[in-house]
Every structure is written in C-alpha cells, then in structure tokens.
Image (cartoon, helix red, strand yellow):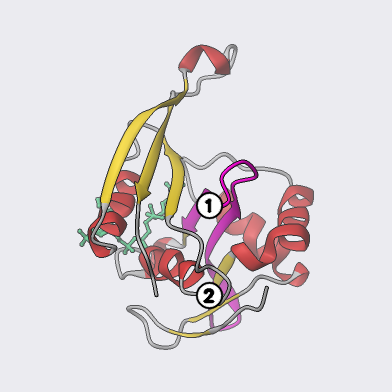
Amino acid sequence: MSVSSGKAGGISSIIYRVPTLEDGVGIYSLVQNSKPLDLNSLYSYLLLTAHHGDTCIVAELEGGVVGYVSAYVHPKKHDTLFVWQVAVSERVRKQGVGLSMLTGILKRPGFQSVRWLETTVSPSNTGSARLFHSLARKLNTSCHTSVYFSRDLFEGQSHEEEVLFRIGPFSMY
Ligand SMILES: CC(C)(COP(=O)(O)OP(=O)(O)OC[C@H]1O[C@@H](n2cnc3c(N)ncnc32)[C@H](O)[C@@H]1OP(=O)(O)O)[C@@H](O)C(=O)NCCC(=O)NCCS
C-alpha cells in the first residue's frame, strides 16, 4: 500500500507522515507522557511500525514526535480500521492534531474499502470520547457504543472497562 505525507491541521508547520523505526523512542516517550494511556513496550511500538506503519501516523514538529496514532485494519473485518492508541503532546492539544492524524490515515491511497473505524475508550476519558464523536460528525456518520472489554477482564489491575466506539459507515472518496 502506498502512503502519503504532508502538512495539514491546526499548526501549519506540523508534518504528518508514516512513522519510521527511528521514531520509536519518540513515540514511546510521547505515550509515556500522555496519561491515562497504557504505556506499552518500546519493542511493541517498533513492531507496530515495522508491520503496520502504513496504518499508523506521527505528527512531527521541529524534529520531534508530537502526535501518534497506532492502528491496523481489523483482521476479521477488512472494511474496518481499528485505532489502538492516540497521543498528542500537551503543547499542541486542542488544535486539531488528533483529528488531523485520524483523517490523515483514512485519506491515504489504498483505504477505499475502509468504511468503518473502531476504537475503545475508557468511560472517564472525556477528551478521547470527544475526539471520536467529533470525528463521526466530521465524517457525517454515526457512532455506536457498546462495552467491549468489561472491568473484570482486567482483574488485579486498576483498569476501567473499555467501551467500543464503532464509527461509520463513511467514505473519504
Ligand atoms: C485525547 C487527545 C488525543 C485529543 O487530541 P487533540 O489533538 O487535543 O484533539 P483535537 O484538537 O483534534 O480535538 C478534537 C475534538 O475533541 C475535543 N477535545 C480534545 N481534547 C479534549 C478534552 N481534553 N476535553 C474535552 N474535549 C476535548 C476538541 O474540543 C475537539 O472537539 P470539537 O471538534 O467538537 O471542537 C489528547 O488530549 C491526548 O493525547 N490525551 C492523552 C492521551 C489519550 O487520552 N488518548 C486517547 C485515548 S486512545
């Protein structure tokens, strides 16, 4: 699948592009500073970049990673992009970077068959919920929610349930 990069969004000097392996440490550090996200291993971010880079995106400002979305095409639903993590550096939040990254992936060549987007959101993460409701509005489509991973599945960890947001159908073309 070919990919695109370019400038977009609320801050004109931000570059949106496919992540490279050299972004791994910057991605790890961004997620580490983006509470309440779960921090995964650096290895997992490198693996996601190596295997699913075409469906992930970074926002770069002044040579540093200020935004990151990890995502992949659902292995059982080929018309659905599953978004795993979205992180935006505090210094550029609420300026459209999160929305620009999500739409940036969906606009890439090769995504014609993707008509749905799924993600999970913790009930207390209002910023995340607002981001995805805003995306549904922008795509002129609906957002259906249902519990995906109930709290008891996280036994022994202080983790909220994860609610599935299913957005669509939509067409970017
Ligand atoms: C959630 C997060 C990714 C949003 O990124 P962002 O670049 O600030 O989002 P945007 O500027 O594109 O905003 C999109 C919409 O969400 C709203 N929004 C974003 N953050 C919000 C917050 N903390 N509280 C309320 N609304 C918020 C914006 O107002 C905007 O709404 P609108 O389109 O109706 O005006 C960012 O705050 C973040 O990294 N948080 C920490 C990590 C996290 O929780 N990630 C999400 C879980 S996967």
Q: Is residue 173 above or below residue 5?
A: above
| Residue 103 sits inside the magenta stretch | no
The Cα–Cα distance between marks 1 and 2, rounded to whole angstroms, is 28 Å
Determine the main secondary structure of the stretch shown in magenta: strand
The disc placed on residue 116 is none
**Of 128 and 143, which appears nearest the observer?**
143
The range drawn in magenta is 59-87
Q: Is residue 93 above or below residue 156?
A: below
In percent of width and height, residue 46 lies at 76, 57
Q: Is residue 74 above or below residue 24?
A: above
Q: Quadrant of ligand 1?
A: bottom left
In percent of width and height, residue 32 lies at 58, 49
In percent of width and height, residue 43 lies at 79, 50
At numbered mark 2, what does the secondary structure look like: helix, strand or loop? loop
**Of 42 and 161, which appears nearest the observer?**
161
Is 120 on the left-hand or right-hand side of 72?
left
Q: Amino acid at mark 2?
A: Arg
Tell me the residue that label 2 is attached to: 108
In percent of width and height, residue 140 lies at 23, 61
Q: Amino acid at mark 1?
A: Asn
The disc placed on residue 33 is 1
At label 2, counting other C-alpha atoms closer than 10 Å, the crowd grade (few under 14, some 14-19, many 20 or more) is: some
